[in-house]
Amino acid sequence: MTMLPPSGPGRMVIGSRIHGPAEIKNTMSPFLVSTGVVALAEIGDKTQLLSLVLAARFKKPVPIILGILVATLVNHGFAGAVGEWLSTAISPAIMKWAVVASFLGMAIWILIPDKLDDEETTTRRKFGVFVTTVFTFFIAEMGDKTQIATVMLAARYQDFFGVVAGTTLGMMLANVPAVLVGHKFAGRLPTKTVHAVAAVIFAVLGIITLMQ
């Protein structure tokens, strides 16, 4: 019989392993980083603008929020899977430089203002609010900053569930207030400042990856 030492302050016993604060922190970091950078990147993004349009048009926040959640989970689940696959399909040396270049590229891209195309703002009432939201939000998110960020983060951390959960939460933190407050919410955020902060975070992540 194996005797486990007492857990003690700041230590947690899970199964037969003892997890200290540093190990728990490392487990949480992909989730926390993904939540933070995507929440910031989403401010003023075209999918947040789409949330404002849907809220102003339909005035039914619950099905819109549920539609955004479903569309984001599917979209980011796919992006996270692609990111993890890339991390195993490409040699570590090439992957490192690809991730660094992607983070630095994202830092520049996020500073470019976003806008909705006319076809992305066109919705069809006959499908209902929920289905319309899922469809339009999923299409708008394809190739968007936050989807690309999810691919990069999954490749960087190789933590599918942590990254997808974090990026999804980040999307909801940015879009739920937009849906609840509607178009009045759009002009009240210092979008340029928020994007500048997000750009700095992406640049720092790129530098950290380079130095490892």
Image (cartoon, grey):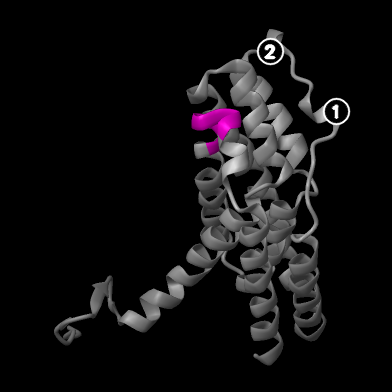
Residue 188 in the image: x percent, y percent?
A: 57, 43
Q: Position of residue 124 (x, y in %)?
A: 74, 14
Q: Is residue 186 magenta?
A: no
Q: CA distance from mark 2 to mark 1?
A: 19 Å
Disc 2 marks a residue whose amino acid type is: Phe
Q: Are marks 2 and 1 in contact (CB under 8 Å)?
A: no
Q: Nearer the viewer, mark 2 or mark 1?
A: 1
Residue 87: quadrant of the picture:
bottom right
Q: Residue furthest bottom?
A: 211
- Closer to us: 118 or 74: 118
Q: Quadrant of the N terminus?
A: bottom left
Q: Label 1 sits on what residue type?
A: Asp
Determine whether the residue tagged by mark 2 lies in a helix, strand or loop.
Answer: helix
Task: Say which residue appears at 73% left-offset and 29% top-offset.
Answer: 136
Q: Of residues 172 and 26, which is closer to you in this image?
A: 172
Q: Which residue is mark 1?
A: 118
Query: Which range of residues does the magenta coloring cover?
Result: 178-184
Q: Residue furthest right?
A: 118
> Residue 37 in the image: x percent, y percent?
59, 62
Q: Quadrant of the C terminus?
A: bottom right
Reading the image, the residue beneath label 2 is 127
